[in-house]
């Protein structure tokens, strides 16, 4: 009798775990990063077959208009913006495209708007380790930092505690550091500013990636 009870309990627990796993996957499909990390249509810097440096803004808008969870919110002089929605029409993320003067996609960014956070270890497990780190703007104990994959045309934006002193800023990058945004940029450019991604001068103090730990 006891053996049967244990078997029933075990079966019940397995059903609960399966249900949770299914629910977790269902929720993850509604996040901004599902089509980038879990089931990408193409490899970075391409996203949903939109390629910075190649795709025109008209082609990009055509792709976006066909995605079931995307609502375009703005088409302007410099590009287009959109939001991701879940099945309940609740915003779960956002996106933005900037184009160059020729109407070609220059940058494509995706950002989070849910509690389903993406961590750095998830990106590294999918795309390997990055090459560069730059804590470029620190204020009131918090740093806005960039982790860059130059060869992939991909940059991750994170926010981390400023562990430095005075004007010497530093951050601690861990496996569970939350990735807030990803930016895709062209890898075809031969200039020294990562295809124009650093035109604004925010990336003057790059350091090489050396694993999890303190930067710069």
Image (cartoon, rainbow, N blue to C red):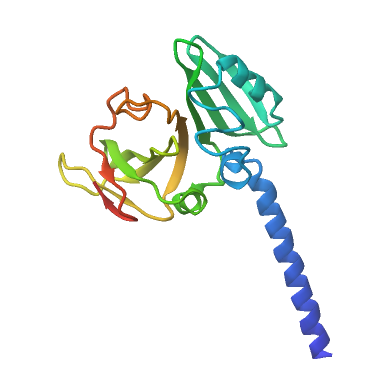
Is residue 62 rendered to the left or right of residue 211?
A: right
> What residue sits 47% from the left and 19% below the top?
98
187 or 180: nearer the viewer? 187
The image quadrant where one finds the N terminus is bottom right
> What residue sits 15% from the left and 39% below the top?
167
Count of numbered badges drawn on the protein: 0
Q: In this view, does 41 lie above or below 196?
A: below
**Residue 35: x %, y % from top left:** 61, 39
In terms of image quadrants, where is residue 134? Answer: top left
**Residue 202: x %, y % from top left:** 29, 29
In terms of image quadrants, where is residue 17? Answer: bottom right
In terms of image quadrants, where is residue 115? Answer: top right
Is residue 49 rendered to the left or right of residue 209?
A: right
Is residue 192 rendered to the left or right of residue 182?
A: left
**Residue 111: x %, y % from top left:** 51, 34
42 or 111: nearer the viewer? 42
Q: Is residue 38 above or below residue 69?
A: below
**Residue 126: x %, y % from top left:** 52, 50
> What residue sits 51% from the left and 37% below the top?
44
């Amino acid at each position: 009798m006891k053996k049967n009870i244990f078997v029933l309990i075990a079966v019940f627990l397995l059903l609960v775990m399966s249900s949770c796993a299914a629910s977790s996957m269902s929720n993850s499909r509604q996040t901004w990063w599902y089509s980038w990390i879990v089931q990408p249509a193409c490899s970075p810097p391409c996203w949903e077959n939109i390629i910075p440096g190649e795709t025109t803004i008209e082609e990009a808008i055509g792709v976006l208009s066909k995605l079931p969870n995307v609502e375009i919110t703005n088409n302007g002089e410099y590009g287009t913006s959109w939001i991701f929605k879940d099945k309940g029409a609740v915003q779960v993320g956002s996106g933005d495209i900037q184009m160059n003067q020729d109407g070609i996609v220059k940058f494509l960014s995706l950002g989070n708007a849910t509690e389903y956070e993406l961590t750095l270890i998830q990106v590294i497990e999918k795309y390997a380790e990055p090459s560069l780190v730059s804590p470029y703007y620190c204020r009131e104990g918090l740093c806005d930092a960039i982790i860059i994959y130059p060869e992939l045309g991909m940059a991750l934006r994170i926010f981390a505690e400023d562990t430095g002193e005075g004007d010497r800023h530093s951050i601690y990058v861990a496996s569970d550091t939350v990735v807030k945004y990803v930016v895709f940029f062209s890898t075809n450019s031969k200039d020294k500013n990562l295809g124009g991604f650093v035109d604004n001068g925010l990336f003057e103090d790059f350091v090489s990636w050396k694993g999890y730990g303190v930067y710069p």
